[in-house]
Amino acid sequence: MSIDRPPVDKAALRRKYAEERDKRLRADGNEQYLRIDGKLAHYLNDPYTAVAARPPRTDHVTFAFIGGGFAGLATAARLKEAGVADVRIVEKGGDFGGTWYWNRYPGAQCDTASMVYMPLLEETGHRPSEKYAHGPEILAHCQRIGTQYGLYAQALFHTEVTDLAWDAAQHRWRITTNRGDAFTAQFIGLGTGPLHVPKLPGIAGIDSFTGHSFHTSRWDYDYTGGDRFGAPLTRLADKRVGIIGTGATSVQCVPHLARACRELFVFQRTPSSVDVRANAPIDPEWFADIATAGWQQRWLENFTANQAGGGADVDLVQDGWTELGKRIREKIQMLPKEQRTLENMRAAFEDADFEKMEEIRQRADKIVGDYATAQKLKAWYRQLCKRPCFHDSYLQAFNLPSTRLIDTDGRGVEAITPDGVVVAGVEYRLDCLIFASGFEVGTAYVRRAGFDLIGRGGQRLSEHWAKGMRSLHGIHVHGFPNAFFVQSTQGANLISNVPHNLTDSGRTIAAVVASAIAQGHQEIEVTEAAEDAWVSLLLTSVGRMAGGPDCTPGYYNNEGRDPGPAARLNVGYPEGPKAYFAYIDAWRRTGTFAGLHFR
Ligand code: NDP
């Protein structure tokens, strides 16, 4: 069934999108951002937990996992369930949680439905309180997993790995850290996440600002007042506050700032697309009814089928993500079967996108009272060029007299002075400047991890991946025995629900490791042939349907710069996430784990 929607002028929209993209293209791409160190290093300090003194560890564990976010927690939980008793998580934050440890800004909330976003809900018996849970609940859930699976006793917090090297003679990894630890592990897991290194914009004068400033992932409640549970930011009542950045983070915290500040200046380079959120409490009785054995896996599969293709009779989650998938399918189904070529399907996808984005732009007109401000808040690009945002009080915040949108027409902030921020020659004097400028994505894996892996024969991971990532299933890498990567690329690559990729990999790793231990094997390694075959299969993928060079710059498209041939490998299973999850489940169930060599 098709829904009547007003026609759109596609040619005009394509022109407008290209114009807006061209304004924002810059020669320095990822290099425009500053690495936080030296004079700026204080932006990384942990404002939440004091660093506790502890003696260095020099022992041996069966499994060490680098990163205590969802990847580490889900993998460790599955390992424990599979009988691996000593699992040590090494984490740079002061507790478990990863993203949810660091991002405590007011209004932080998941934007994929809690029922599928929060891992291990069924195992922990936790009922999410809302369709989209807020940060404190998600952090508490991470701690719940840590407690339930006995992960705290072995964990090393406020600890960063400095070196990871394979010791072939002892069949184990040697791990050293910035806290003086030098311990060994038979197996290692890597869940360092794609978005854990905060970045600052390379704006002239950034280190000259004499007011207060911080990055959103290190929120300073001592300065702002209020708390992460949503208490008003009372200490801002007499302050002029600026926020640089209008991505997913800013969309969530601006409403809180707008209510609290004497004056709030939102410095915008590119507007986000902000669709309806429609959050609601989860009814305990409804939840009790649906939470029968296996419920979360059913929900995960249903979300993936609706969102990423594959078809499902019902849509359990029903949100902006599943709607996006359904709209595209609806367009494709309108094509006669014989006309469903790749080209026509791409065109259908574009049509669905134009319509959706028109709706989102009209939403700005409906909500924002000031006409000129509403125009500036409209996003002129395809919805998946940037992380789609959903919020029911962001656009409304611009109706408050204290809030001003300072649009830079794609050019970005010009300069930062000791007193404030300059845009188009005008200085905006500020008491406080907040950087909602995001996290490193397009930089090299080893730069973001903070260490290189030294595998068999002294080979470095950076060398093995010099021409692009190579793996089997995104998990196993030839030359790096007993090491497992927990991330989305070269696996399901399901971007709409990242945790699903991670929890599924945790299951795979636990199955493989438990099998090796049961059979007395010391080493597990993907064969070169299996890795080559997987990479060849990935190269048959038609590539991404969105987020390409036509998009406005952002971290989804390497800031609009040609990422080179290596990026061709940053893809997922050619048949899509649903097919991948089915494939890998069958692979696991065989118990023979084709492609892996056990020694
Ligand atoms: P983003 O990278 O999405 O946003 C950074 C912002 O800073 C952009 O608006 C960018 O503009 C702007 N910026 C950069 N340089 C300048 C400059 N010189 N002048 C003015 N503005 C500038 O970071 P976020 O922290 O918002 O989000 C990162 C990711 O984290 C999200 O995409 C999402 O994946 C995740 N996230 C998820 C949430 C959730 O699930 N609920 C919530 C928050 C984040 P431009 O767009 O032009 O580059």
Image (tube, helix red, strand yellow):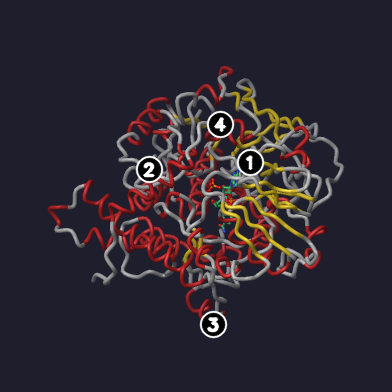
Q: CA distance from mark 1 to mark 4?
A: 18 Å
> Which residue was labeled with disc 2?
550
Q: Earlier in the sequence, mark 4 or mark 3?
A: 3
Q: Earlier in the sequence, mark 1 or mark 4?
A: 1
Q: CA distance from mark 1 to mark 3?
A: 47 Å
Decide if ligand 1 comes within 8 Å of the CB at mark 1.
Answer: yes
| Residue drawn at x 49%, y 62% as measured from the top left | 274
Q: Are marks 3 and 2 in contact (CB under 8 Å)?
A: no
Measuring from the top left, give residue 82's x and y in whole percent: 56, 50
Q: Looking at numbered disc 4 in the image, what kind of residue is underneath it? A: Ala
Q: Quarter holding the N terminus? A: bottom left
Q: Are marks 1 and 4 in contact (CB under 8 Å)?
A: no
Q: Earlier in the sequence, mark 4 or mark 2?
A: 4
Q: CA distance from mark 4 to mark 2?
A: 23 Å
Q: Looking at numbered disc 1 in the image, what kind of residue is underneath it? A: Pro
> Which residue was labeled with disc 4?
444
Measuring from the top left, give residue 191's x and y in whole percent: 59, 42
Res. 201 mark: 1
Please tell me how crowded label 1 is: few (under 14), some (14-19), or many (20+) other residues with Cα within 10 Å: many
Measuring from the top left, give residue 200's x and y in whole percent: 66, 41
